[in-house]
Image (cartoon, rainbow, N blue to C red):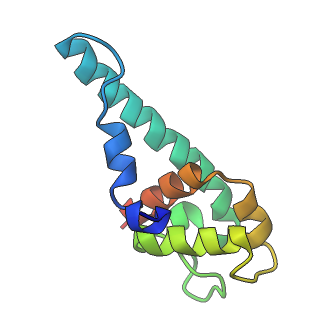
């Protein structure tokens, strides 16, 4: 399965796995781990605000597209295409190369959740 096809399911599967032993500890640690991953994705997505606007909401008259609320799979595919060189660009190919595939999936998930 490709990363794009798995993008919708991969982050949730990773977040649902317990990290410690014992029922109460499993649930708390999983929730804490999920919150930490969401915060990390939010922090990484903050770098996008310079061009794409705060929380991915570009101004209405901007030539740069907004990212908030766009489908995760679309964002992942675009970033992976920039990263691989399949999609040309001035700045985005260099930016995309700075992220792992897992980071791209997490950031795309965060932007998709911004409505």
The location of residue 102, given as percent across then percent down, is 54, 50
- The residue furthest left is 23
The quarter of the image holding the C terminus is bottom left
Q: Residue at x 26, y 19 (%)?
A: 26
Quadrant location, the N terminus: bottom left
Q: Is residue 57 visible?
A: no
Count of numbered circles on the image? 0
- Give the percent coordinates (x, y) of residue 12: 32, 47
Picture layout, residue 62 above or below residue 56: below
Query: Does 51 sit above or below residue 38?
Result: below
Image coordinates for residue 62, horizontal then vertical, percent: 63, 85
- Is 91 situated left or right of 42 in this image? right
Front position in the image: 114 or 107? 107
Look at the picture and state if 31 lies above or below 1.
above
Q: Residue at x 42, y 67 (%)?
A: 72
Q: Position of residue 35 (x, y in %)?
A: 39, 35
Q: Is residue 47 left or right of residue 105?
A: right
The residue most toward the front is 1
Residue sitting farthest toward the top: 22
What residue do we see at 70% from left, 63% from top? 96
Taking the spot 46% from the left edge, 33% from the top edge, the residue there is 36
Which of the 4 image quarters holds residue 90?
Answer: bottom right
Could one spot residue 25 in this view of the protein? yes
**Image position of 83 (left or right of 105):** right
Which one is in front, 44 or 14? 14
Q: Is residue 23 left or right of residue 78?
A: left
Residue 112 placement: quadrant: bottom left
Q: Is residue 89 above or below residue 51?
A: below
């Amino acid at each position: 399965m490709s990363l794009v096809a798995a993008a919708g399911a991969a982050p949730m599967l990773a977040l649902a796995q317990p990290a410690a032993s014992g029922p109460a500890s499993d649930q708390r640690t999983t929730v804490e781990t999920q919150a930490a991953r969401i915060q990390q994705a939010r922090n990484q997505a903050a770098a996008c605000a310079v061009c794409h606007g705060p929380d991915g909401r570009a101004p209405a008259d901007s030539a740069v597209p907004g990212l908030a609320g766009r489908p995760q799979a679309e964002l992942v595919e675009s970033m992976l295409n920039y990263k691989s060189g399949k999609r040309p660009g001035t700045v985005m190919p260099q930016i995309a190369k700075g992220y792992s595939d897992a980071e791209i999936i997490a950031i795309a998930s965060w932007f998709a959740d911004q409505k």
